[in-house]
Amino acid sequence: MNLEFKEQVWKAQFKSTEESAAFEDNLRKAFGLQYRYEAARLLIGRSLAEPIPPDPLPSGTKFYNKPIPGEYLFGDYDDLWLCALIIDGKLSPTATVDDFRSLVEAHWARGHQLLKEELERCHGNEIRLIQRLSELLPESGVDTGTNDVPATGVEGEVRLKVGSVSRTLDRDEPVDFVLNGPGLPPHIALMGAIGKGKTMTGTQIAIELAQKARIPFLFIDPKGEFVADGRVVGPLASLGARVSGIEVGTDPLPLNFLPPHTAPSQKIARAAMRLRDTLAMCCKSPGDLQKDLLRTAIQDVINSRGDRSLDAIRDRYEAALLANGKSGTDSIISRLNEMTGANMPCFEPTLQPAQFFTRSWVVSLHLLPEELKRLVTLVLLDAVSAFILEQADSPVVGGFRVLRHLLVVDEARKTLREKRSESLVDLVRQGRSKGSVVMLLSQDPSDFEGETDDFTSQLGTVVAFACNQSKRGLGALEGVFGRKLQAAEFSDTQLEAGVAFVKLPGSLPQRIRCWQPANQPA
């Protein structure tokens, strides 16, 4: 390590935000910490447990007026702290002490937000907070392969609005609804033509749900509306440190979606077949031999104790092709090359599913070509479905099921029309008992053509802005609305800007003003 740089860090002054300083005082009292730097280390360390660096603090951030010198902040373990922070922030050899200070203070601020939220989830119970923090420590010893994770949501009813306005059109009365009530399907579908407000309204509902239920979410963003330069932007940025943004193609998704070698053989076989089928869906008619060799290659990688990446699967599959007298290049190899290329990495086996899906992510796919975008979406859906459906049932407290996770799929029509993909359908059908909520954003009812009545009946809430429709598409939603639907009910004349035709759990369909156009008076 550069000793001059280390000396400069030793003498530098580091500041917390005003909000963090107040929280640290309470933290010191709760845990019996004597010095400010002890609480600061806890917050910085908590932020370092996240898989990606924090966003820089915005200009105008209000800092506490009593800084902590580097010699006290890092103490006798300064070499370890410096190494961890420099590696995490990917600081170059030319980085200055100011660069390092900015990184530390960003970690400090994010750690405050994360720890404050976790203490709230634990209802102020410091012992439970310690247990939650211990779950973030790197795993040691034998990997048991368990995906068990306690419910993360709050107990009691979760009541939501339908957009920012949420008032009936005919009587101008406020509207809200209970998402997790007894016997109510929790899943939500929003549809509407481009520019009608479905994404805006869906995002508002997702934010309110994440805040009220205190659950993590996975937002699949094919158009790249909510991530820029690896940072969450737009309305979702209001959630702060609790959500991370990934632009797939620039940064890989830090998800190890394969089960460990210690998992039961049936689970390993299912995972291998699922990934085989997903890869095959995005390839040009692979033959039975190719699919069998691919399944075996995936299973061999899972059973090994070494590299578990897609690169390893590709290499084993390629070797198997050559051993069977086949060319070392086919459509499966091409797809795997696209997913693992240095210019467009898609996955990196860093976090186990229980670590990944108990955090919130916005996954931007706009950098990927359409076929690769489709493949990454399908792999993600396989992973979240496998993780959620392996959990024990979420508890029901006072008649209300505790929620655990929200999945949001934008441009869902492309996935809904993938008839051979069962993961999303399984999650919608079976996820309610596990505390899962699925939100689908699509363009019109015809996107649900071909889905079974059992699937569509699980959509407890449908928010339809003006959109195109077909007879078959309307028929697919009759189970949700409980009656025959007419095309005129979804027309521009019936649904002016900001108004949607809405079916809420336990209520009759009605027109609701979800948002107020800027050119109309409130």
Image (spheres, rainbow, N blue to C red):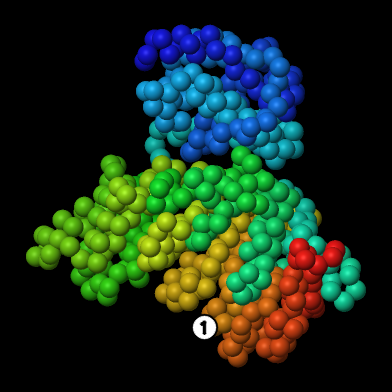
Tell me: residue 458, above or below residue 477. above
Tag 1 residue: 450
Tell me residue 481's x, y (percent): 71, 81
Where in the figure is residue 53, as x and y percent of width and height?
A: 50, 35
Residue 455, placed above or below residue 222: below
Residue drawn at (79%, 69%) of the image: 513
Q: Determine whether 417 is above or below 118 in the image.
A: below
* Quadrant where the image shows the N terminus: top left
Give the quadrant of residue 130.
Answer: top right
Out of 386 and 67, give the one closest to the viewer: 67
* 383 relative to 371 in the view: left or right: right
Residue 262 image position (x, y, % from top left): 37, 46
Front residue (pair 274, 82):
82
Q: Dividing the image into 4 quarters, which one contains the C terminus?
A: bottom right
In the image, farthest residue toward the left: 325
Q: Secondary structure at mark 1?
A: loop
Which amino acid lies under the numbered mark 1 shown in the image of this protein? Gly
Which image quarter: residue 290?
bottom left
Residue found 71% across the figure and 88% down from its top = 488
From the viewer's perspective, tell me whether residue 485 is left or right of residue 372.
Answer: right
The residue depicted at 67 percent of the width and 30 percent of the height is 61
Give the camera-side residue of 116 and 500. 500
Using the rendered image of the protein, determine whether residue 501 is visible from the camera's viewpoint.
yes
